Amino acid sequence: MEDFVLSHSDPATGLPVGPRPTNPAEPDYTSEQVLAAVLASVDDDKAEDIVQIDLRGRSDVADYMVICSGRSSRQVASISEKLADRLKQEFRISARMEGKETGDWVLIDASDVIVHVFRPEVRDFYQLEKMWLPAGSTLAAKG
């Protein structure tokens, strides 16, 4: 989206006068493109045990969930921060992030893709994969 500079205000109302930016109803990227960028980013930053879960038809919250691990709190925070930066640069997504301060479990909300970055012990405790994977499926972790 471009930034428009307004040249003046309407003297009668005091409101800005000039072109209004248009907000497209649909983003110019797909959830699959965001998912691919997320997977590439966490892989580049050496995340471990990367699991992708398709939520389409199972949740209105997002289309995909990605769960991965970092070896330390510092790496978890770094993976998360770099991912948020890359999403902003590539798609102009301002991903919301929770938990980066402690680095045990960081949740990144990238709209149609939800990302969980854990320290291994915390991931083992919560076992999100078991809750979200379809019944009868097995983990095909990467990393």
Image (tube, rainbow, N blue to C red):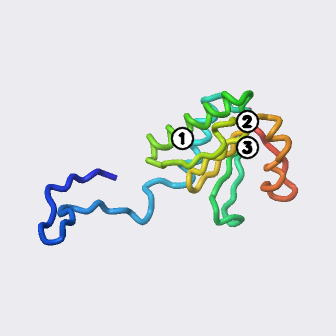
Three-letter amino acid code of the residue under disc 3: Val
In the rendered image, the residue lying farthest to the left is: 11
Instruction: Indicate the position of residue 32 as horizontal and vertical percent values.
Output: 57, 52
Which residue position is annotated with label 1? Answer: 84
Which residue is rendered at x = 58% and y = 44% of the image?
36
Please name whichever residue, 117 or 47, is drawn nearer the observer in this view of the structure: 117
Three-letter amino acid code of the residue under disc 1: Ala
Whether label 1 touches label 2, CB < 8 Å:
no
Tell me the number on the disc at residue 22: none
Please name whichever residue, 33 or 13, is drawn nearer the observer in this view of the structure: 13
Q: Neighbour class for label 2 at 10 Å: few (<14), some, many (≥20)? A: many
Question: Looking at the picture, does residue 98 appear above or below residue 121?
Answer: below
Which residue is rendered at x = 69% and y = 55% of the image?
54
Q: At numbered mark 1, what does the secondary structure look like: helix, strand or loop? A: helix
Which residue position is annotated with label 2? Answer: 69
Which residue position is annotated with label 3? Answer: 51
